Amino acid sequence: MTTKPFASDVRIHPTAIVEDGVQIGAGSSVWDHVHIRRNARIGCQCSIGGKSLIAYDVEIGDRVKINSAVYICYGVTLETGVMVGAGTIFTNDRFPRATNPELTELRPAEPDEHTLRTRVCAGASIGAGAVIGCDLTIGRFAMVGMGSVVTRSVPDFHLVVGSPARSVGVLCRCGKLLCKFAENPHTPACSVACPECSRHYRIDANQLVTEPEQSAV
């Protein structure tokens, strides 16, 4: 059982490994067989699902939900309100090798010039079994479909699916699909209201989603 000096309402399963220097915010839960490496920073009211691994120096905002068996490598930042589905894998090297070119020495595990960063912005969701490339950004309230392979940045509010993942529509903050993209021509500029929560948006040329109301996030 960990004895780290966390807030009294932080729940850490006895089988979890939490290394030195880790910060965990109030109200967060760390479930069975999780391993959190040194100096990772986890916000308030987060849930870290069983058998997940969070690498050193990873930054996780408040109210983030990470399901079971997720691998979050060095260089990843998850902003507030992000959801990561079970079995998701993050990466941080486009051209990885185990050894030097002569095959005589292992490459060090520490980050180097090949290590690239990824940011998942506030409110975004990643479906189960997705693989997330590196040196990219997943935009605010975007959604990655289950099993997708993300190789380039995802715009705010876009839904992407497939391997490699491509944009197929735009979403409301609540997660409801607002508009499906046509096969070839850009969707004409239009205003749309969410059928679920009645928020209003403007969609222009498949690439821009604006909100008339100011948002706190």
Image (cartoon, grey):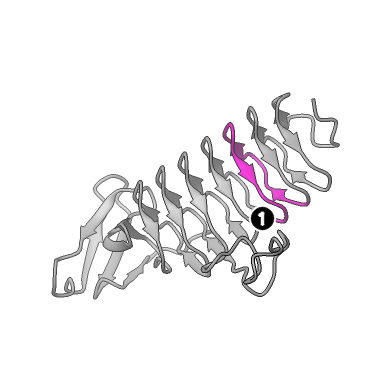
Q: Residue at x 24, y 75 (%)?
A: 205
Residue 105 image offset from top left, x and y in percent: 71, 63
- The verdict on residue 113 being magenta is no
Task: Give, as a single range, the part of the protein colored magenta.
Answer: 39-59
Of residues 66 and 192, the one drawn nearer to the viewer in this rendering: 66
Quarter holding residue 153: bottom left
Q: Is residue 202 above or below residue 79?
A: below
Q: Residue at x 64, y 65 (%)?
A: 103
Residue 197 image offset from top left, x and y in percent: 32, 46
Quarter holding residue 73: bottom right
Reading the image, the residue beneath label 1 is 59
Give left or right: position of 85 versus 31. Answer: left
Q: Is residue 133 above or below residue 10?
A: below
Residue 169 image offset from top left, x and y in percent: 26, 60
Give left or right: position of 72 versus 180. Answer: right
Give the amino acid type for the residue marked by disc 1 in the picture. Answer: Glu
Give left or right: position of 143 versus 82. Answer: left
Give left or right: position of 18 versus 162. Answer: right
- The verdict on residue 52 being magenta is yes
Task: Please state, as top left, top right, bottom left or bottom right, where the N terminus lies in the image.
Answer: top right
Q: Residue at x 73, y 46 (%)?
A: 37
Majority secondary structure of magenta residues: loop
Quarter holding residue 97: bottom right
Tally of marks? 1
- Crowding around mark 1 (Cα neighbors within 10 Å: few <14, some 14 to 19, many 20+) is many
